[in-house]
Amino acid sequence: MHIHRTYRAKILNHSQVERMLDLHGWSASKLWNVANYHSRQVWDETGEIPDDSDLKRELKGHDNYKGLHSQSSQRVLEVLAEAFNSWYGKRKNDSRANPPGYRKKNYYDDNGNRVHEEHPRSTVTWKQKGICHDSKHNHVRLSKGANHKDHPRDWDYILVEYETRPEVTVENLQQVRAVYDKSKGRWELHLVCKHEVETPDAPGTETAGVDLGICNFAAVAYSTEEADLYPGNRLKQDGYYFPKEIAKCDDSGGKEATRLHAKWSERRTHFFHSLAKHIVERCIEQGVGRINIGKLNGVREDENGESKNWGKHGNLDLHGWAFDRFTKILTYKANVEGIEVVEVSERDTSKTCCVCGRADKGQRVERGLYVCEECDAAFNADVNGAENIRLDFNQSNSESAPDLGGDRSTGWLAQPGVYLHDLSHGFSPREQVVNCKP
Ligand SMILES: [Zn+2]
């Protein structure tokens, strides 16, 4: 199994490489701005946002593309396309959401003074083809963009001497990021290394099912007839609070707006990480070796059963984006414990009764309850979805209703444990069930 670790490194020959790194940081900003302008134009004309491969094709011949090594330029365009997709999703719920900004804004120094800078020093990423690493001498050679090789006799690379913390060994270098630290007025390197680690034994052979949703961000069903709910109200509250505060800022690219954006994103990331950690801990307790998680499709259904097709960006609406991000974090944390994470179809998982397998019109979902007339019972709707995903009935039983045994208890389906998130303590249990009010 491979894991990636990022190490920060100080640049020892800073005065020798500073000018060249500045030039590359500015080139990254210029390319960002050109691609941003292009994306907005396409959006205005067609209502579609170009994805990263569109951008690469369009800008490949552009002069600013040659300011960086080709893989570094590609990375700038990938980050921009991702930022546009994230905005595209957010604007569905929040008309004030701003598309990614241009990188030519003023910034504020430590004393709060506005400093004008035409092109800020953007982070520059080098991937493998642009890196030559000498681990013995702590040197790394980073390929220059063609535009910065003024003379034919110029070096093709920037030779950086770095220093990490003494206990760190830099091996299998995959990626190097040059990041400008404004407060220190210096560049530093972030070195991403691939490590081979032994795959641990799974905690057991049981399967858990995870259903991601909006009211309850996650519902988890275990084979031990236990279920957990993780309400997403903290994410929702932030989703109201931050856009409102950001809208109050005079300058949407100013210091305060930037700080709020960063804070919001940090809180979201924190939520995802502590949720994934909590689920993995519960899976270890429950002897789980495999987590089934609902796989999102490009076309999803809204409450009226109408499919929302947002073209090729369909699965990148706000929630889709958040679910993708969370699924990646969960997969990473589970794999470290030897638990595999498998994306399974979530087709009909919310419509089908997980006890009797019936999926006809008799069933209905009200106030977070799934009511089955066949079983004459009401379950928590999200737990029902999670249990169907755990059973993966789309895979195991395509023709007949699943035979789940007539004497299964159903009480646990109505009484899941509820865990609420707290910024300082992570998730802790709450006794009563929270239902989603429409
Ligand atoms: Zn039923």
Image (tube, rainbow, N blue to C red):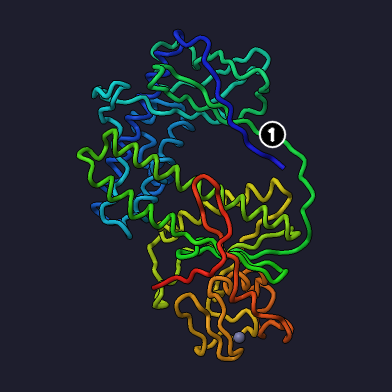
Q: Nearer the viewer, residue 188 or 233?
A: 233
Quadrant in which the C terminus is drawn = bottom left
Q: Quick one: SS at disc 1? A: strand
Extreme front residue here?
A: 431
Residue appearing at x 27%, y 30% in the figure: 104
Give residue 229's position: percent from left, percent from top. 56, 64
Left or right side of 111 for 272: right
Q: Quadrant of residue 341?
A: bottom right
**Placement of 225 over or under 74, stated as above or below:** below
Q: Which residue matches tag 1?
A: 195
Q: Residue furthest left?
A: 250
Residue positioned 43% across, 56% down in the render: 316
Q: From what the image shows, is residue 381 above or below residue 429?
A: below
Label 1 sits on what residue type?
Answer: His
Q: Is residue 243 left or right of residue 155?
A: left
Q: Position of residue 263 (x, y in %)?
A: 40, 41
Residue 177 vs residue 105: left or right?
A: right
- Viewer-side residue, 123 vs 74: 123
Cβ of mark 1 under 8 Å from ligand 1: the answer is no
Residue 128: x, y in percent? 58, 30
Number of other residues with Cα within 10 Å of mark 1, as a class: few under 14, some 14 to 19, many 20 or more: some
| Residue 246 sits above or below residue 305 on the image | above
Residue at figure coordinates x 35%, y 42% from the top left:
261
Residue 123 is situated, as x and y percent measured from the top left of the image, at 43, 28
Image quadrant in which you'd find residue 224: bottom right
Q: Quadrant of ligand 1?
A: bottom right
Dividing the image into 4 quarters, which one contains the N terminus?
Answer: top right
> Which residue is more in the foreground, 424 or 135?
424
